[in-house]
Amino acid sequence: MIITVASGKGGTGKTTVAVSLALSLAKSVNLANPLYLDCDVEEPNAALFLQPTFQERREVGQMIPEVDPETCIYCGRCAEVCQYHAIAVVEEKVLVFPELCHGCGSCTLNCPTDAIHEVLNVMGTVERGWAKLSSASRRLEFAQGTMNVGEAMAVPIIRQLKQGVIPPDPGDRPIILDASPGTACPVVESMRGADFVLMVTEPTPFGLHDLRLAVEVARDELGLPVGVVINRDGVGDQGVNDYCATEGIPILMRIPLDRRIAEAYSDGGTLVDTLPEYREQFQNLYAAIGRLVAERKGARA
Amino acid sequence: MKQLVILSGKGGTGKTTVAAALAHLASQDLPIVLADADVDAANLELVLDPTKQEVQDFAGGKLAVIDPETCTACGTCYKVCRFEAIIPGSGTEAYRVDSLGCEGCAACFYQCPEEAIRMEEQRDGQWFRSDTRFGPLFHAHLFAGQENSGKLVTLVKQQARLLAQDTGAALVVVDGPPGIGCPVISASTGMDLALHVVEPTVSGVHDLERIMATTNHFGVPSLVLINKADLNPARADEITAFCAGRGVQVVGYIPYDTIVTEAMVQGQPVTDYTDGPVTEALQAIWERVKDHLDV
């Protein structure tokens, strides 16, 4: 089962929840080893808490055109078809602007003399390994994408992280994707293909405003089932509770405002290591999500 | 005229809280213009009580549309699309376009042997010019899951700058998006100063390094502000030392205080809502930022 953890607003506790969920599931002998993907490739933080050892590291990016000056007839067709103005033909010279290229390959397909071949423009890395766990008998697989500083596009890195790591048929294996804040294309890419989107929010006007937008993307645009975790419960106002009740969105867990959790987090401590009584709650959260996903599949069948 | 952007790398560290407070404090000294550059989750409007004066559509990109009448189900579009945006359908609709996956590259449009595909311009969002009690505000709303947030950020920022130039405003304050990608690059380019809001946590420190490397890369000087500084004093010291090593000044420390959330619930900048330690810290920060900007 693939679960994407998202929020809209940043800093609501996505990584806190995703990490604690993964650690709690790793303890559960009834489940296959969980797999964790940090899809916040601009600011990946989960490794700070899960302290993985990486076995594999590869450079990723997208394929950009390279023009063979021998074969090129400078007809300008590549520049004409490129929607991103990433390629320009000036007299007998072809200029490629990698930072504008989306790697769609249209220039290659349209070149009448086959003068274009594509090369990898490195934009970041994908790493894969195992999280540090206290119990030797259980394992938590971990992978993350990291965008290089100065690069603009996160989506190609997230796409390659997912393609390289998520098995084609995940079956019952818990797969947790930790998304970036916001609701734009990187978040959409992190949600595509998920069975469920878990929204972590805080009960404040900012939290609610951005939760609505994230629900629009996950539920209304992508048609995925959603549920909410309210973090720092007790701070703020009633807006998130009222919204969830009106929209029929299940509130699956509440984590109270507790300075101990914030202090532990500040030093890289996880919620379930600080307060182990939460482990069972996270296991129950996973079971509840499983029931909601099964219901949805039943309703469709 | 000077331009200041509030950034953070990590989300939820208090960018908007700081931007709203600086808007309030700066407007008492100078004529200012405001811009909310976090176009996919814009929050500044929630604490500035804006009155919309102008609403404009934003058309950023294009979307492939397949005409089922002309389509012969040859599958060429499916083969050439690298974004998994062409989805095999059923019945009269052999293939359909996933509008959230489509990047508008037009590869399918050019390759379709039947010319059954057209590219349609998409309305990706809206932008607004509003009045607030601190000055004009430019803000925007990118529709759910759309691309081109960088272009919309550039547009919002440009509108704010042009109005500031026309009206002789001394300062543009830009509330930035989280992360280090295209919206952040769009928000940062051309700015006179970036103020990074960081929390004393392992994530905060890690993300500060990446956002400062990004603004350095684009030639924007940095100042740092540590929010919720007393949550972990040792880590706040670590950030201060890290900044000193880079020749970057820490312009202030804001204590952890739930009054910040209370002010947000009341829809007000914290400096306008209370006179406590948080407000005092922000007043001192504004004085230092003002000196740096020389406004």
Image (spheres, coloured by chain):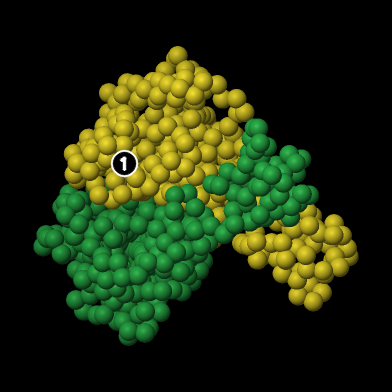
Chain colours: A yellow, B green
Residue, disc 1 = A201
Residue toward you, A92 or B67: B67
Q: Residue at x 62, y 28 (%)?
A: A168
Residue B196: image location, x then y, percent = 36, 62
Query: Is B77 situated above or below B251?
Result: above
The answer to whether residue A173 is left or right of residue A56 is left
Q: Residue at x 28, y 50 (%)?
A: A206
Q: Residue at x 64, y 32 (%)?
A: B90
Residue in front for this viewpoint, B197 or A189: A189
| Disc 1 element | strand
Residue A135 relative to residue A200: left or right: right
- Residue A231 appears in which quarter of the rendering? top left
Left or right for B32, reference B271? right
Quadrant of the snapshot with the C terminus of chain B: bottom left
User: Residue B121's spot in the image, x, y percent?
Assistant: 57, 59
Task: Give the left or right position of residue B52, taking residue A287 as reference.
Answer: left
- Residue B186 vs A294, above or below: the answer is below
Question: Where B187 falls versus B13 (above or below)?
Answer: below
- B285 or B18, nearer to the observer: B18
| Amino acid of disc 1 | Thr
Image coordinates for residue A29, horizontal then vertical, percent: 44, 15
Taking the spot 54% from the left edge, 51% from the top edge, the residue there is: A154
